[in-house]
Each structure stands twice: as structure tokens, then as C-alpha cells.
Amino acid sequence: MALYSFEASLGGWVAHWFDDQGIERSRFIGPEVFPPYSTEPYADPPPPKRRRSNPRPSVASQAMADLADLRAFGFAHRPAFEALRARYRELAFALHPDRNRAPDATARMALLNAAFDRLRARYSP
């Protein structure tokens, strides 16, 4: 018994084969086996849906990033913006590579500037 034809018909599929005695047989296979919109009996499944990366960070991750930035300035909670700006000026004066001869002064100043830019964009009046 070998299947020799498989064709679409209204609402389903028809399979054709010869049985053991050489008699041609056919059978209707309904739409529950193959959906009616399919053009081939074994059509490829649709590609898996790609997970969209969320372009905006969640509120919790933003709060954690803000807390890390505030801790870089020595605050445990969100201060007034004027206090944050004053602390930035103090740290920038102390960490600036022209005044600080430490080998990592440039990197520390860059981190301080990046943290202040993020906090200023979020909390400035």
C-alpha cells in the first residue's frame, strides 16, 4: 500500500493509493487534520513569534538604576535636586583628573558624569 497522490479538495484533502490487491482507493481527510487555508498537505508551521524586546525599561529596573546612581553620590534616598547638584559639584571638584593624580581618575569622573546626566534627565525641575 503506497500513497501516490494527495490533493486539496473543498473543505479538506483527498488521499489516493493502491491497496494490497492493486485496487485504487481514496479517502477524504477533513479540515480538522489540515486547515482549509493550507495549500500543501504538510505545510511548514508558521514561524515562532519573536519576543519583542521592551524598548522602555520597567519601573523597577529604572528605580534600581536610580538608586545605584544616588548611592554613587552618597545618598540612600532621593534628595532635592539642589542637594544633588551641590554634591555633584563637590565630587567633580575632588575627582577631576586635573586635580586628582589617581590613575583611575578619568574613569571615575566619567562614571560620575554619566550618573549625574541620568539623574538630571529624570529629576531636574
Image: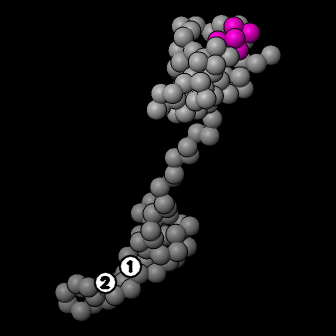
Dividing the picture into quadrants, the one containing residue 109 is: top right
Are the residues at dot 2 and dot 1 in contact (C-beta closer than 8 Å)? yes
Q: Residue at x 41, y 72 (%)?
A: 42
Q: Nearer the viewer, residue 121 or 102?
A: 102
The answer to whether residue 119 is left or right of residue 19 is right
Which corner quadrant holds the C terminus?
top right
Whether residue 58 can be seen here: no
Q: Residues within 10 Å of mark 2 (few under 14, many from 20)?
A: few
Q: Residue furthest left?
A: 20
What residue sits 47% from the left and 31% below the top? 104
Q: Which residue is mark 2?
A: 3
Tell me the tag on residue 66: none
Span colored in magenta: 82-87
* Mark pair 2, 1: CA separation: 7 Å
Q: Which residue corresponds to mark 1?
A: 15
Name the kind of residue labelled 2 in the image. Answer: Leu
Q: Name the chief secondary structure element in magenta.
A: helix
Magenta span includes 64: no
**Residue shown at 52% from the left, 69% from the top:** 38
